[in-house]
Image (tube, rainbow, N blue to C red):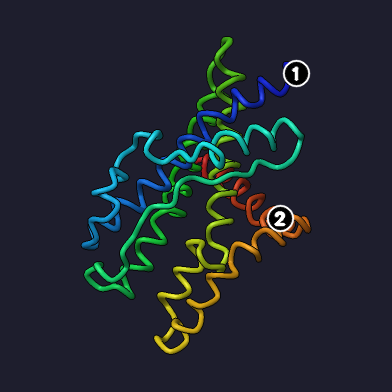
Amino acid sequence: MNTDTIQLITIYAMPVLLAITVHEASHAYTAKYCGDNTAYRAGRVTLNPLKHIDFLGTIVLPILTIALGGGLFGWAKPVPVNFGALNRPKRDMVLVAMAGPLSNFGMAMFWGLLYKLSLNITGDFSLPLMLMSQAGMQINYVLMVFNLLPILPLDGGRIAQGLMPRRYAYSYARTESYGMWILIALIMSGLLYGLLKPFVHYLVVFTAFVMQF
């Protein structure tokens, strides 16, 4: 592993951990608020990253993809949710699913503020803060857009299922067993990058525009 790769991992490490931790904790907190204590009993209503990290998906795979020069890819431990225990299962399924992507949007805006700050300070800390902020915006928007794809078990799939009439929702729920295979096919074919790239680009441009004020 060369010096450039080590520097890249150093820049991305904190934004990745924060993005994943806040995303998963948001799911867990919203589920608890909506009446399901499953994630709470599992210790997932917390900002402690150790509770959300999957060793292979959160540490090994992202490091390998960065080291090999590919796009950043990985996952965290999914938050357990008993949808039947929610106060209003159909509505609350949507709220719990939306919490993760919305948290990533908020985190991206936070990193946008730090990027703006980095442009107005001097010293050795300015460049690392700028690079880390750029990484933070990119990672959070990638996670947000990726998770909003209407494919089960992603958040976008849960949102779509919750918004559908019940008779269609039951049929749609049966596609979950094929969801991971669909995602693997999209990744291996390179189509996933093509789907995500324009949305992430315009979201970063939007953030830069907002930060002008």
Which of the 4 image quarters holds residue 122? top right
Relative to 50, is 126 on the left or the right?
A: right
Which of the 4 image quarters holds residue 137? top right
Q: Marks 1 and 2: in contact by CB < 8 Å?
A: no
Relative to 103, is 118 on the left or the right?
A: right
Which of the 4 image quarters holds residue 131? top right
Q: Residue at x 40, y 48 (%)?
A: 24
Q: Secondary structure at mark 1?
A: loop
Of callouts 2 and 1, which one flags the residue occurring earlier in the amino acid sequence? Answer: 1
Residue 166 at x, y = what percent?
A: 39, 86
Mark 1 Cα-neighbour bin, 10 Å: few <14, some 14–19, many ≥20: few
Nearer the observer, 106 or 57: 57
Q: Residue at x 22, y 69 (%)?
A: 87
Which quadrant: the N terminus? top right
Q: CA distance from mark 2 to mark 1?
A: 26 Å
Residue receiving disc 1: 2
In this view, 66 is above or below 34: above
Nearer the observer, 133 or 77: 77
Q: Secondary structure at mark 2?
A: helix
Q: Residue at x 29, y 58 (%)?
A: 31
Residue type, mark 2 in image: Ile
Nearer the observer, 15 or 211: 15
Residue type, mark 1 in image: Asn
Residue 197 at x, y = what percent?
A: 70, 53
Residue 179 at x, y = what percent?
A: 58, 67
Residue 33 at x, y = what percent?
A: 23, 57
Q: Residue at x 62, y 38 (%)?
A: 61
Residue receiving disc 2: 187
